[in-house]
C-alpha cells in the first residue's frame, strides 16, 4: 500500500496552509490527512482536494496511525510533540529549528543530500528557509570548484515571520497612508518603508540566530565543515520570497559563464540572468514557485576565484512546505 | 567679504531642494542664491530663509558673479554647463558622476579627505551617495588597521532615483491596495513589496555602474588603490536613507569593541549598536539626519581579521546635499 496517512502540525499557519496545497499540487499519495493546530483553531475547516477537513487540537494522541507527520508549529511545539508522533510510528519532517543540529537528525535538502533521508531515526529536519535556497544554488558549484567562503546578505520577506507579520506590514502601510500613528506588534520597529537588520534573536557573538543558522546548517547540509560562512540577515517590506546577495570564494577558478552552465543543468534551479534585458530574479515573480532563481552571476573583481550572485526563492515553498513534501516523497 | 553668491543647478530636484534647506540650516553665508533648473520649472518659486526665490532657466549665462555653483541636475547637464560656471569664476561642486574619476577633479568627503579641496581646478566632485556613507564609516578603521577588502550589499531608497521614483512607489502601493494593474514608469519592474538587484545601468563585467562607482570612488577617496571592493546594489521600497551590509577584511586584527571605540570618536558618525535593546541603525530614523549611523558591529567569523557592520545614512543629505554644502564650507 503506497498511500500514506499524513498529519500536519501547525496546519493553519503560513507554512502549514502551503503544505496542504503542495500535497495536493504534487499529487502526494495521501490516504488520510489530519490537520492539527492549537486550541483556538479547532473548528476551522481547511480544503484539501475536494474535502473540507476539520482542524483538530494538536496533542499527544494526535498521531495514531499516522505515517508521516509534517511539523510546522514552532520549535517549542516540535520539542513537545514530535516524540509522540515518533512513538506512534510516524516519521516526523520538522520545519522548526528544534532538531536541525542534532547529530542523529538528518537535515535534508533533496537537491543536495537526498541520501541522508535513509539515516533518520524518526525525525528528519527541514532546514531554515534562507539556508535552503542558498545551498540549492551553491551546492552544484561546490561540487565542481569547492567553496571556501560564503558572504551572504539577505532581503527576507515578512511572511517568513508568519501571517501576523503580513498583517503588520499591511496595517502599517495603511496607517502611514492615513497619517495615523504606526503601531508595532510583531517587529520591534516599523517594517513598512524600512529595512530591519534583525531576524530572530541576537546571540553573544553579535550575530542573530538566523545568521548562525545560515552558517551552521549550510555546513551540515553540504557536509563540509571547512566552508567558512558569514551572514547578515535583513527583513524587508516584501510579502513573500527571500532574496540573497551572495559572494563566494572558490578553490578553483570558474568563469561566470561556467557557473551559469553548471546551474542551468542543476536540479531545482532556474537561471534568470540577462541583465541587459532587465532579467534577474525578483521576489514578486518567485512567489508561488517551487524553484530557486539565480541571476546577476559575475566574477567577483575583489578576490581570486570569486563569484557574486543573486538568489531568490519562495521561502514558504522551497524554503519550507515544498522542501518538506519533497522529503516526504523521498520516504515513499 | 565672506558672503558668497551661490547657484544651485537642479534646484527643484530631490537633492536640489535639500541643498536649499541645508544652506539655510547650516547658516551658510549666502549673499545671493540663484536657483536654476530646466525650462519647465521656470516660474516656480522656492523658499530660502524668508525669501521666495524664482527658479530661472539653467543656461550658459546663468553663472555671472556666482562664487559657488552646486550642481545636481544629472551628469549630462553637468558636462554641458559646469564649464560655463568655471569660466565665470565660480567653483563648481558637482553631485553627478560626470567628473568624479577625472584625475584633476578632487572627489571629496570632508570627514575623509578635506585637504583635497585645495587641489581643485574649478570643479570638485561630490561622490556617489552609497559610497559616501561607506567611506565615512570605513575610513577611521582603515587608518588604524588598513582595509584589504570590502564586500558590500546595499538596500537603497527610491528617493536616490529622484522625486518620480517616490511617486512611483506610492502609486504602486495604491494600485495594489485597489487591486489595479501595477504600472512601471521609473523602474523596469515593480518596486512596491519587491527588491530590485539593479541600480543604474549594467556594464560589460556584469556589475552595474552604481556598483563600480562604489569600487572606484572608494579607492580614490581613501587614496588607496590596493583596497579590493565588490558591491551588489539593490533598490528597496524605502522612501529615504540607504542601508548597507558591509564585510571588511583588515591587515591588523581589531575586536568589535575596538571598532566601536574608533567609530564613536570619528567625525560624522553615530554608533547605534545595542542589539539586545533592538538598537541598530534604521533608514526611517536616519531620514533627515546629517550623520552616518553604524551598528551591528561584529567580528566576522568567516575570515581572519574580518569585521561585519550595518551602515545607514540619509542619502539625500550626507549622500548628496549635506556633503556638497560641507565642501562649500571648506572653500570659505
Image: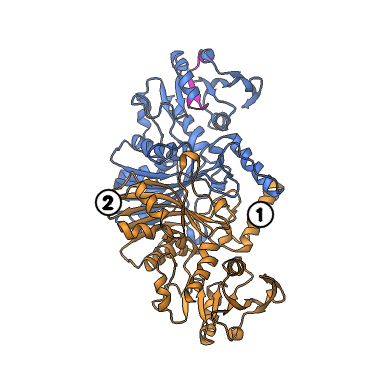
Chain colours: A blue, B orange
Closer to the camera in the image, A182 or A321: A182
Closer to the camera in the image, A172 or B32: B32
Magenta span: A62-75
The residue where tag 2 is placed is A252
Assign a secondary structure to mark 2: loop
- Residue A78 vs B213, above or below: the answer is above
- Residue A297 vs A95, above or below: the answer is below
Assign a secondary structure to mark 1: helix
Chain of the residue under the numbered disc 2 shown in the image: A
Q: Is residue A63 magenta?
A: yes
- Residue B206 vs A34, above or below: the answer is below
Residue B33 lies, in percent from the top left, at 62, 77
Q: Name the image quarter holding the N terminus of chain B.
A: bottom right
Q: Which one is closest to the eye, mark 1 or mark 2? A: 1
Residue B97 lies, in percent from the top left, at 48, 71
Residue A110 lies, in percent from the top left, at 41, 34
Q: Is residue A247 visible in the rendered structure shown here?
A: no
Left or right: where B234 falls relative to B205: right
Residue at figure coordinates x 66%, y 41% from the top left: A171
The residue where tag 1 is placed is B170
Amino acid at each position: 500500500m503506497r498511500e500514506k496517512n499524513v498529519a500536519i502540525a501547525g496546519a493553519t499557519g503560513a507554512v502549514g496552509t502551503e503544505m496542504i496545497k503542495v500535497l495536493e499540487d504534487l499529487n502526494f499519495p495521501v490516504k488520510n490527512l489530519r490537520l492539527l493546530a492549537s486550541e483556538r483553531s479547532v473548528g476551522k475547516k481547511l480544503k484539501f482536494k475536494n474535502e473540507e477537513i476539520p482542524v483538530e487540537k494538536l496533542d499527544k494522541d494526535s498521531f495514531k496511525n499516522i505515517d508521516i507527520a509534517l511539523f510546522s508549529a514552532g520549535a517549542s511545539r516540535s520539542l513537545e510533540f514530535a516524540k509522540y508522533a515518533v512513538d506512534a510510528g510516524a516519521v516526523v519532517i520538522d520545519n522548526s529549528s528544534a532538531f536541525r543540529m542534532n547529530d542523529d537528525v538528518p537535515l535534508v535538502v533533496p537537491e543536495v543530500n537526498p541520501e541522508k533521508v535513509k539515516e533518520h531515526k524518526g525525525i528528519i529536519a527541514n532546514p531554515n528557509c534562507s539556508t535552503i535556497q542558498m545551498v540549492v544554488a551553491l551546492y552544484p558549484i561546490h561540487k565542481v570548484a569547492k567553496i571556501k567562503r560564503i558572504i551572504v546578505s539577505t532581503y527576507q520577506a515578512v511572511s517568513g515571520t508568519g501571517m501576523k507579520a503580513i498583517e503588520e506590514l499591511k496595517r502599517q502601510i495603511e496607517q502611514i497612508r492615513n497619517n495615523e500613528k504606526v503601531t508595532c506588534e510583531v517587529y520591534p520597529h516599523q517594517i513598512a518603508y524600512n529595512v530591519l537588520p534583525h531576524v530572530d534573536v541576537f546571540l553573544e557573538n553579535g550575530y542573530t540566530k538566523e545568521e548562525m543558522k545560515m552558517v551552521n546548517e549550510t555546513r551540515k547540509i553540504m557536509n563540509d565543515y571547512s566552508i567558512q560562512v558569514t551572514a547578515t540577515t535583513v527583513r524587508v517590506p516584501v510579502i513573500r520570497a527571500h532574496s540573497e546577495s551572495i559572494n563566494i570564494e572558490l578553490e578553483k577558478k570558474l568563469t561566470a559563464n561556467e557557473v551559469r552552465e553548471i546551474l542551468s543543468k542543476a536540479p531545482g534551479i532556474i537561471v534568470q540572468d540577462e541583465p541587459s534585458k532587465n532579467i534577474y530574479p525578483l521576489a514578486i515573480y518567485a512567489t508561488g514557485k517551487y524553484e530557486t532563481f539565480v541571476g546577476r552571476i559575475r566574477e567577483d573583481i575583489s578576490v581570486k576565484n570569486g563569484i557574486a550572485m543573486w538568489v531568490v526563492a519562495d521561502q514558504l515553498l522551497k524554503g519550507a512546505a515544498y522542501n518538506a513534501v519533497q522529503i516526504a516523497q523521498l520516504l515513499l
